[in-house]
Image (cartoon, helix red, strand yellow):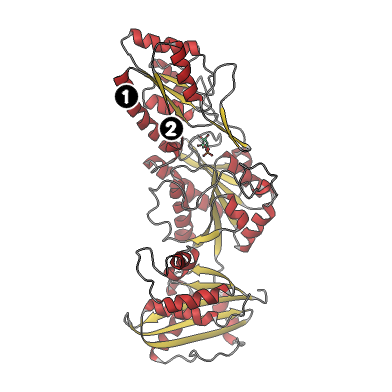
Amino acid sequence: MADNEFIIYTDGACSGNPGPGGWGAVIKHGDKVQEISGRADETTNQRMELQAAVEALRYIPPGSRVKLYSDSAYLVNCFNQGWMKRWLRNGWRNSKGNQVENQDLWKQLLELSEKTIIEWIKVKGHSSDQLNERCDRLAREAIDGSGENIAGEDSLLVDNDWSSSSLMKSVPKVRRLGVLTGGGDCPGLNAVIRAVVKGAGYNYDIETVGFNNGFKGLVENDAAVIDDYRVSGILNRGGTILGTSNRDNPFDFRPGGSDYLETGKDRSADAVANLKKWEIECLVVIGGDGSLLLAHRFSKLGVPIIGIPKTIDNDLPATDVTFGFDSAVTTATEAIDKIHTTAESHHRVMVVEVMGRHAGWIALQAGMAGGGDIILIPELPFEYPYIVEKIMERRLRGKKFSIIVVAEGAYPAGEEPIYQQKGAVKRLGGIGPMVSREIEKRTDLESRATVLGHLQRGGSPTSYDRILATRFGVRAVELFQAGCFNKMVCLRGNHIESVSLEEAVKGTKQVDPNSELVRAALAVGTSFGCPL
Ligand code: F6P
């Protein structure tokens, strides 16, 4: 332990709430240990928890590094989850708009904590942790006055036999996992975060530290411990509680993200240093191909990594399915169902552009589920005469409308996919409106295009994605516990397995034009806008 490092355990107790209260703290500095405690006549449990932390922090020289362990989730969350910042902004009002209780103590705590580099750590109740139990006893002894170390003695930390006893040695080292979500978001990210946090905490007493906004948070050390409370109620929520970014590359880091043209800096060393600061044993990266490639680079720098595949595009070759895909297909299918009714009313050719980058999975599956008449995917460059032929054939059969589902990466044979450019970054998109314009030119029919865009990435995950995400998260923790690093969890058949990161980042999984899936679509009369 370095000279400026301190460990503090605190606890409060009350005989009746409110009632006479006591607080206790154990402060450890190298081999020296000090126990302090105190009593108050009429107080509450929360007040005593706060008092314990305030009194203990008074012993700490400014600039020291402190690990403060408490079993009060409220106290720890206040600092780790930014509640304090929110209260400050809102004039010491909580999320319900009420004045925060015990402001006097919170303010002292804030002031004291700002003088040190402090890490707030939640421990389980006193029964599972001997130092916490010791603090609890100190607090209870203080209530009835039987304690020996009553506050007010502001002695310096003293040598104490007890410090070298088995009690000190039995303090368990907190094991930590880091987690971040990188790349474009997708439904199911929260379900994985929840599975990692709960799987690690419940089964192995492992703490999870979440880095905010993907690799940006890792570079800038924007992180906090994620406790059980924070992952409660998020299973069905879209997005990611950690935030994400598909523009921040630690090896080419630009303050404004990759969209900006200026040259980036290699900040990977900062990222690694931040992992060390948090004493993180392994980083769980939840991401698509871009984030997993970065994760792979970090593994080469010696960072133990476990990858979890996510993307609505389903284009990662090492897993049969990525979570997020099923939800995107469900959203796109619902949209196609709706487009169907208006297409029919107006006798129009409706073109629906879906995402998927250079893979046609979303277009193919949503197109099949939504009864698209023509499905255009990047794996099968299309030709306009085949599209027009299909529309006309339908017309002859009395079907005055048609639905075309086009993947954003699809393109006419002999041409290139269409991109939109912003700054230094090119993103796919625009083929839907182009196909629609071309149909109006080549036929006497009216056509409209709808680009579904980010709708496909939003909203609640389907039950399939929630379950897959949970299985992936749990397996990632199991791999960590087993010491199997630099792997990505994956789905093979109906089994959760793992592959090396090396394997995981190879290539793109595209639709096989000869697959049973494509043949099934052809068998029910779907056209792919090309000879098949
Ligand atoms: O990879 C997911 C994805 O939604 C692609 O389907 C799409 O091409 C891309 O991300 C869009 O990225 P952005 O959110 O940066 O516009």
Image quadrant where one finds the N terminus: bottom right
Q: What residue type is labelled 2?
A: Leu
Residue tagged 2: 452
Query: Is label 2 within 8 A of ligand 1 (CB to nearest ligand atom)?
Result: no
Residue tagged 1: 342
Element under disc 2: loop
- Residue 483 in view, yes or no: no
Residue 228: horizontal and vertical position, in percent?
Answer: 43, 60
Q: What residue type is labelled 1?
A: Thr
Residue 334 vertical position relative to residue 137 in the rendered view, above or below: above
Mark number, residue 220: none
Q: Residue visible at 48% across and 46% down? A: 472
Earlier residue among tags 2 and 1: 1
Judge by depth and name the residue closer to the eye, 430 or 317: 430
Q: In which quarter of the image is residue 447?
A: top left
- Residue 225 in view, yes or no: yes
Element under disc 1: helix
Residue 34: horizontal and vertical position, in percent?
Answer: 56, 85
